[in-house]
Amino acid sequence: MNDTLRHKPFALFLCSRILTSVAFQMQAVAVGWQIYSISGSALYLGLVGLAQFLPMFILTLAAGHVADRYSRRNVSRLCQVMEGIAAVALAVLSFGGWQTKESILGIIFVAGAARAFEGPALQSLFPRLVPAMLIPRAAAWSASAFETAGVVGPAVGGLLYAAGPAMVYLAVSVLFLGAGTFLTLIRTEPAAVRRQERISIESVFAGISFIRSRPAVLGAISLDLFAVLLGGATALLPVYARDILLTGPWGLGVLRSAPAVGALAMSVYLARRPLRRHVGRVMFAAVAVFGAATIVFGVSTSFTLSLSMLVILGAADAISVVIRHSLVQIETPDEMRGRVSAVNSMFIGTSNQLGEFESGLTAAWFGAVPAVVIGGAGTILVVLIWARLFPQLTNVYSLEPRK
């Protein structure tokens, strides 16, 4: 058994993360298919991403301060309860036949507000559940837990959708309840969180200032932001599933699972065999592969080839995620992890949710295929520019914690 998994609090944390992530992925499949069926517009697929991004953007600094002043475990549990209630609301509206594209966007906005607080709290909790030397392995296991959910969640969501979207949303609410239960079993928070710091403009913006003072961390976070912002094709998978690859909700579930299959395999590999040399260069190479696979996916009309490209880009993205997450956690002192993690969450949310909006908008303008191809090419261009802008990231050799 891996050393990180021998720590019971961390194992409970992983179980909670898996259930939360499975719930989110299942809900994403149901919401994507339902809103595209109601609206028939790729733009509304993008608006789903925007509805999740806006609360994260607005609440990021407040969420970081909350994570550094209060129990990170309790904050996470409260957010999971709120997300479960939002899922119940989606189920009730769907079951009664009252669901509209506006109601979906409104409820997703509320759930996004909860996720804005949950992300920094969870990210800053897990590094205190294992010794510092095991943080890179723990980051890889955490990523593998997320990717396991990415494999299981979309497939289960697609299958359950056959019984109606309400069934998916009800299952999602149960999973959020289970995730909160696992966090409850972590009886004590392993490190005291700083609660007495006086709130000031400087303390609120401390996370941003800290990241700006670490060029390698800033380069890693911003590289991931712009690469996924441009290259993310996830929002357009309902279009590809229905109109290009000519499949149904089950096919959408399989397509959404494919990146997670590649990412899961890579995350497990990195958990057992951590990167030890030239990690900065490895990150740049991985993001370039992500962009290239996105281009091939964009032009493919073969279900098999499309799945293969999604698996490859998922594996490449996992390398980037593990390196970025490890750098952030290793470089950040515990009393600032909430605020730094909040800024990191905002960058991740920008790349994922705002990326979905960008994909939906460009698809509405140019069509789905040109939007994906342009995005993949933009990702490769970002790699070339960032390699020159952030030589400190290029020169990062290892993820060993500083003595």
Image (cartoon, rainbow, N blue to C red):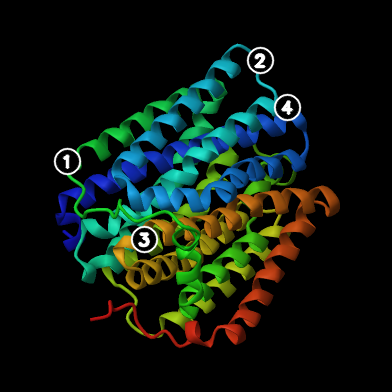
Point out the tag, 2 or 3, that comes first from the N-terminus: 2
> In front: 258, or 85?
85
- The mark lying in front, picked from 1 and 2, is 1
Point out the tag, 1 or 2, that comes first from the N-terminus: 2
Q: Which residue is mark 4?
A: 38
- Secondary structure under the numbered disc 2 in the rendered image: loop
Farthest residue, direction right: 365
Amino acid at pointer 1: Arg
Residue 187 is labelled as: 1
Let me know if residue 280 appears in the view. yes
- The mark lying in front, picked from 1 and 3, is 3
Left or right of 296 on screen, residue 139: left
Q: Position of residue 377 (x, y in %)?
A: 71, 70
Amino acid at pointer 3: Arg
- Secondary structure under the numbered disc 3 in the rendered image: helix
Residue 252 is labelled as: none
Q: How far apart are labels 3 and 4 at the CA level? A: 41 Å
